[in-house]
Image (cartoon, grey):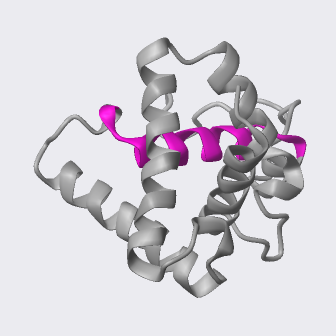
Amino acid sequence: ALDARQLEIVRTVADLILPSTDTPSASEVGVHQFIDVMVSEWLDAEEVDLMLAGLENLDGEATTQFGRSFLECDVTQQTQLVNALDLELERLRDTDADVDETFFHWMKRLTLTGYFTSEEGMAALEYRRIPGAFEGCVVGGPA
């Protein structure tokens, strides 16, 4: 669903949300590809329009502030733009606004979902597919 430029913006934003640390970055586990599939096969038409408009608005804001597209900005400028989106999302949450209708809400939601449902993301959470033995409550039982 996303063209090459849009996919690269998604990859860059996802990596700013979840950069490489002692765990892989979002793009290293394929989050941008996950988001592309979600946009093409899972989101409804209004949500797709929201995502596509959000990508265009981010690119436009980069041009307004820095005189170049989002992808041409350096990492400091890209981070500044993404942080502004995050602050706006936080402000909206504080006012009980419907954040489901914002680009960055969906971008964060899909980034986190894609990351933490990947094998690498589950490993970072120390997810165990098969849990250990069940240990029931041993406090307050019959005397």
Can you give x and y, in whole percent of width and height, for residue 69 in the image? 58, 67
What residue span does the magenta drawing correspond to? 101-119
Could you tell whether 52 is left or right of 32 in the image? left
Q: How many marks?
A: 0
The structure residue drawn at horizontal position 52% and vertical position 36%, both measured from the top left corner, is 52
Can you give x and y, in whole percent of width and height, for residue 76 in the image? 57, 86
The relative height of residue 122 versus residue 39 in the rendered view (above or below) is below
The structure residue drawn at horizontal position 66% and vertical position 55%, both measured from the top left corner, is 9
The structure residue drawn at horizontal position 20% and vertical position 59%, both measured from the top left corner, is 91
Foreground residue, 23 or 6?
6
Foreground residue, 116 or 128?
116
Q: Quadrant of the N terminus?
A: top right
Q: Residue furthest front?
A: 67
Q: Can I make out residue 140 in this image?
A: no
Foreground residue, 143 or 92?
92
| Quarter where residue 124 is shown | bottom right
Q: Can I make out residue 18 in this image?
A: yes
